[in-house]
Amino acid sequence: LEEGQEITQEKVNAQGKRVTQVIRKGMKPQQARSETEHLAAGRDIALRKMLRWKVRYFTDGAVIGSRAFVDDYFAQCRDRFGPKRKTGARKLRGNATAAAGLLWSLRDLRADL
């Protein structure tokens, strides 16, 4: 649960008031537990929540977008990929299947989704 967890820090300012500062944005621990239980029960999560929760596609996926957008990027950077690869767009997997068909990734991410 710590991967996407929000980190805050409480400080006392010069006026003596307690101020909470967000160090890293993310989900609050209770919300992360709730979403994990929701997934464990076999229910899909909303696309909006899935995209917020699973930022791995945005960091490791390299390019995210419609199938045409990802394929266009692939064509522009064709020399960076192996000769056996025919298309650029890859379906989202794991917990990201709510977006399958809407969003595509340049990399085929498999582990820890």
Image: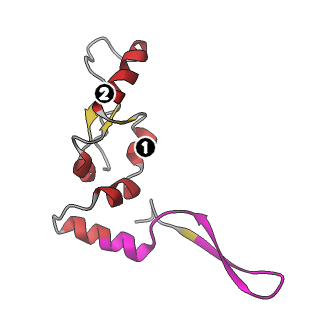
Q: Does residue 56 appear to the left or right of 108 in the view shown?
A: right
Residue drawn at x 29%, y 55% as measured from the top left: 47
Q: Does residue 71 appear to the left or right of 17 in the view shown?
A: left
19 drawn magenta? yes
- Measured Cα–Cα span from mark 1 to mark 2: 17 Å
How far from the left and from the top, in percent, is residue 75? 37, 16
Residue at the right extreme, as displayed: 14
Residue at the left extreme, as displayed: 42
Residue at numbered disc 2: 68
Magenta stretch bounds: 8-34
Q: Secondary structure at mark 1?
A: helix
Which sits earlier in the primary sequence, circle 1 or circle 2? 1
How far from the left and from the top, in percent, is residue 7? 56, 68
Crowd rating for badge 2 (residues with CA inside 10 Å; few <14, some 14–19, many 20+): few
Residue at numbered disc 1: 58
Residue drawn at x 59%, y 72% as measured from the top left: 8
Q: In the image, is residue 90 above or below residue 52?
A: above
Residue type beneath disc 1? Phe
Residue type beneath disc 2? Ala
- Name which quarter of the figure residue 45 lies in: bottom left
75 or 85, nearer to the observer: 75
Q: Secondary structure at mark 2?
A: helix
